[in-house]
Each structure stands twice: as structure tokens, then as C-alpha cells.
Amino acid sequence: MATASPDMKFLESPYQGQALANNEIRLLTITSITTNYKSKTSRTSKSPEWWASAVSKMKERGRKFIRRPYDISIELQTHRHELTEDLDFDAISYVWGAAPASVMVTCNGRPLLITPAAYYMLQYLDLYQYKTKTEQRKIWIDAICINQDDKEEKASQIPLMRGVYFWSTSVIIWMGYSTDETSVFFAEFQEVRKKLEEWNAQFVADPERPDLLEAGLPRDELGFSEGLSQLLRNEWFRRLWTYQESILPPKATLLCGTSWADFDEFLNLLRDGRSRTPYLIRMRGMAEDVEVNIATRACDSINFYRNPTTQQRRANTLTPTHVARDLSDLRYRRVKEPVDRVWAVTGLLHPDLGDSMTCEVDYSEQGRVEYWKTWIMFAKALMDNGGMDLLNIPPTLDLGPSPLPSWCPNLSGRLSCRRRIERSWNIEIKKDLDVSHWAVFEENSKEKCAARTEATECHDKRFISTSKHDSLLRIRGFVLDIIEEVVEHGEVLDIERARYDKGSEEHMALYRLAVGHHMEALDLARRVYYGKSKDVTDIPDDFIIALFLDDRITDEARDVYREVLAELSSWHSAPDPEPVKGGTHEHAQCVGLVEGMRGHTFFSTKGGRIGYAHPGCKPGDQVATFYGGEPLYIIRQLNPTKEDIDSTGQASDHVQYMGAAFIPHLMEQHQRDAARMGPDAMFMIH
């Protein structure tokens, strides 16, 4: 085993004689792993005792994160294969790491430089194959199966990425070395998972539910929760390419050091322990930091795609709708090139749509510099195929002038608000499954939701169009109201902060600002409904509805909010404020709603209404509905130039898109029709 020497670049390529034809990939096998400080032993003759010694050394090296001399030699072989449905292989999803390719292995009898991350991963993969009796199994690793020195080959392989992961037998997700805490997590994983399944079954049978902690905490609660947190903080959850890599294969395995678990069971544990119950949230040491929050949101999205109950629905639903819904979360995942923010997710689209995009892959220097052209092309394709949810993505903070049209979301940077305004007012309420059933209720919810969706999203006047010749979005709708007054934050908030540290002056300044914004919004609501706010203690019902983004709230929701408001008010005025600490799950959920509205603009209208919108709207902006869209939309009139006039001769308004909005009692189509201020218009959104 050796590191790179100065003359490495003059060595023969291990890919000689393996030029890839159209729709071909390389697959590799690990043929031999030997040590340099003992007699060489072929892989096939390693005894259990040899592996026990190797595992011990790997664990020691992993825990201490020591980069020891590369004392293990690895021999690989690659072979070309046509990428077909019946090709049996495992794809590997991992993070390359920042270190350059500097470790030498043997591939096809010739030296090949790989990264240290890939070098150590191959050893653990070899051990995994040994323990699962899958030795000599073919695997696909991008850093080895694609000639990284051949730009043309790399460009030709990118359109095949969807097929590689979709047709693979399984994907192995490499989490890196194990630690004491991750070892505890994997040791107790199955027991905790089964406890949560049992508790959820009790919950379905008895919605009054026993205390969830009666299900029993892990034996090593702190070790379990810290091990889970360490996994969720792994860089793998922050890389964009890994998103589709984990969704497309039929089977997925999470591999961490010498431990592994079924990835779908891991996702279900997070769903059952954080979304359906607060089991994991209430554990000691399960801190809700930024990294964990981002990872769990990503896991929720991955679980939606991988969950067997949604597979059939995916086939019958326009996929761009789902992709658009996820893009606001995906912006927190890292990419090497901005243009990858499109190519790393096109594999999730319907093959016909995805293939039409991948044929336009442009990895030239100009294509990478002018990446926004690819973003606009991507947004147009989604819009033309039903992806109106793109308009629900909040704007991005801290950016200068943008080359993007106002309707095209920026796919990178920090979001300006924490909560998306979408669909919450028209989601079917399932009392036996939804932990928020205390807050919203509706008889015959399934039928009513279907009827509202049919009336709104399937409207016969729906019209959305883009053109290759310009960046305008043409969409039909009408104006409902005009914004009269707004309440918005005076400075940028850290919208991802899940908890405030009362010992930090910076944290508490942000906390006071957030609470102050909420109280100003309540004052505005009182002025709209009662004509004044001074000495008024009553809370307008529409204000609570706006907070929940749902007209179907219960009396319990109103009562819980009043309790939270009293605590917010006292903490806001106290000299040493302490952030909200709810004593019940309902209380904690309500606090989460208040925190989730950080960054949004609260507004009143000339028609005497109130609501929430994405930040940036101003008095005079119009509230509109677009046929086929679920939320309301804020637009700002523009003065078109002579070149902007619509050549079709239709009545059209040239506008700038400002964001999505919610107004109580205005989210159903018949309510919008009754509130219209004028005739239909063809909005030309710049």
C-alpha cells in the first residue's frame, strides 16, 4: 500500500480497453484485501479469527479518528455492463470528503488513486459483504466506476445516474466510522423501533393514549439519542446528490462502521418518534439543533417517496408537484456546482420529463457559470407539467440582484421564513393517525377535501404557460383584495433556530424580536376587527385561524393558543425572559406554530381581512388567486414596456410575483369567486 508519488500521472490508466459505449456502466468487485505487516492472505481464505482482529482494529481506528499509515492493500476489478433492469448489483451512496485522491489501490492490475474516504469505506464494505455472505458481489461507486480523469465520460454518465440507482438491487448508504454512541443506537435500534410500533397501535385503538413514555425508553437513553443525533448530523444528509440516491433503489441499507440497519426501518423510527409522537423529542440529549432538523425534514421527504403505501400513488400523480414541494428543504443540501441543484434531482421526475431535461445537460464552463439558465429551464419544465407548488417556495435571504424571474425560486441560500404556506387547510384529518387531531376537526373530511381539491386544482379555467423565447410565466386568475397594512420583521431572523439560549444576549434579542412581531400582528388584527387594540384582551378568531393556516380549528386549539399567548406576553416583558417550555404535547405543538411563523409578513386588507404571506409584500400589493393553485398569491403591478405587451391581444397584467398567502375564509374556490374584485386576467409574471 502506498500514497501518491510525483510520477503517478504517467502510469497507465486502469480503464484501458474499457471505454464505455452508450448506456454502459462499469461495476467493480473487491477481489482481495491484504495487510502489509503480515503474510499476504487472499480475501477468500480469511478466517473468522482474521476478521475478528480486523474488526477490532477498524473500531479502534474509527473511534479515535486516527489516519494511520495505509497498511492494507486493496485489489479491485471492473467490468463493463449494459445498464438494464435485470443487472444485479449494489450501488453505494456516500460523501467523497474534502481530501484529494491520494491513496493507491490496484484496479485491473494497475495503480489507481482514490480518496481516503473511499479507501476506508472499501474495507468496511468488504467486511459487510463477508458478514452478509455476499462476497464478490458487484458494486457501483462513482469515484471508481467512472474515470474521473475523463471529462467526456463523466458528462456522458450523468444522464445515467437515475438508471444506476433505479435499477440497482439495493443501495448501501455509508455513514462512516462508528462511535461508542452510534454503536449503542444500532444495538438498541430494533427494540426501540418495535416499542414505538406497539405504542402507535395502542394510540390507534385508544386516541386518548397512555403516556408514550410508558412504552419504555432505551436502556442507554443518552447514548441512544446521541448516537441518533450523530447519524443525523452526518454530512451525507447535507449532500444533494444523496437525496435521489436513497430514494430510487428498491432496497436501502444504512451502514456505519461494522453496524447496519434497514434504511426504511430507520426512516419509520424517525416518523413514529418525531412526527406521530414526541417520543424522540422528549428524550434526554435529543437536542433540536439545525443539523438534526434539516436531516429529519429530509428523511420525512425520503420516506414519502420510499414508503410502499405511496408508491402506487406516485405512479398516478404528477411527480413535479412532489419535487417542487421538496425543493425548499433541498436547498440546505450542498453541491459542488450550482447547476447540480437541478441535475441531482431530475432522476425523481417521471422518466419522460427527466429524460427531456438530461438531454440538455451542460457541464461546460459557460454552463456552470450561467447556472441560472438551467434553473429557469428546470422551473419552466415543472410549471408546464403541473408544478405550481414552485410558487409556494419562500424567497431567499441575503442575496443581491438576481437574474431569475420573480416566479422562479432560488434553489440555494437561506429561506426568508420557516413555514411553507401550502395545503394545511385542505389535508384530510385522520383522527386515529394524526397527532394534531386535537387542533383541527371536520366531519367527512376525506370527501370534503376531495371536493375542495377538485374545485380548486382541477378548475376548467386553469391556464399555465411558459415560452422558450422569454422568461415570463403566463397564468390566468383574478384579484381578490388589496393589502393595506403590513407587520414584518425589522431585521433578518435566524429562522432555523429551534431553541433559544436564555444565556445568550444574541439569542434573546432574536427571541424578543420574534415575540414582538407576533404581538404587533395581534394588535393589527384587533384594530381590524374591533377598531382599536388598546385595552382589548379578546383575540379575533381569524387571528388564531391564520396562525394554524386552517379554518377547521377546534375549541381546544383556541384554548391552548390563549395559554401560550399569556406565557409569550409575560416572557416578552420579563427582565430575564425564558423561552416557552410547554408541559403538554398540544402546548408544544402550538408553540411550534408560533415559532414557525417567524419571518412571515402579517397583513390586513382594504376588504377588512387579515392573513399571512411570504415576506416582502407592501401596502398596495394585490391578493390574487390563480386558477389551479391552492394558496393565494401576492402580486405587484408593473408598468410594461412596449416590448412586453402580449402579442395575443388578451387582457393581461404585467406583474411581479411576491409570494404565497393565507387568508381565513378565502381558501375555497366558491369563497374566492364571491370575493373577486374584477374580471379574469392573464397575468404575465416577470
Image (cartoon, rainbow, N blue to C red):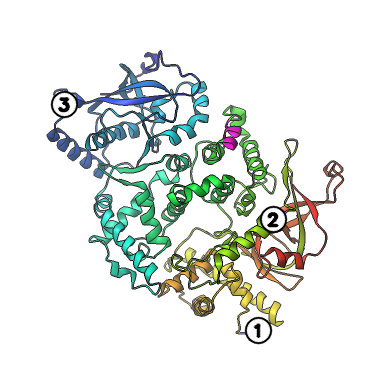
Label 3 sits on what residue type?
Ser
Residue 45's label in the rendered image is: 3
Q: Give the side of residue 49 with respect to residue 535, left or right.
A: left
Q: Nearer the viewer, mark 2 or mark 1?
A: 2
Q: Nearer the viewer, residue 57 or 92?
A: 92
Q: Is residue 200 magenta?
A: no
Give the residue at x 49% y 30%: 160
* Lateral position of residue 268 relative to residue 452, left or right: left
Q: CA distance from mark 2 to mark 1?
A: 32 Å
Distance (Cα) linking label 2 and label 3 = 66 Å
The span shown in magenta is 352-358
Closer to the eye: label 2 or 3: 3
Q: Nearer the viewer, residue 292 or 464?
A: 464
Please, what secondary structure does the residue beneath circle 2 have?
Answer: strand
Residue identifier under label 2: 658
Query: Can you identify the residue that label 1 sits on?
Result: 534
Residue at the image point whose x is 40% and y is 38% from the top: 95
User: Main SS type for the magenta part?
Assistant: helix
Q: Is residue 325 above or below residue 677?
A: above
Distance between the Cα atoms at labels 3 and 1?
84 Å
**Image location of residue 679, percent across then percent down:** 83, 59
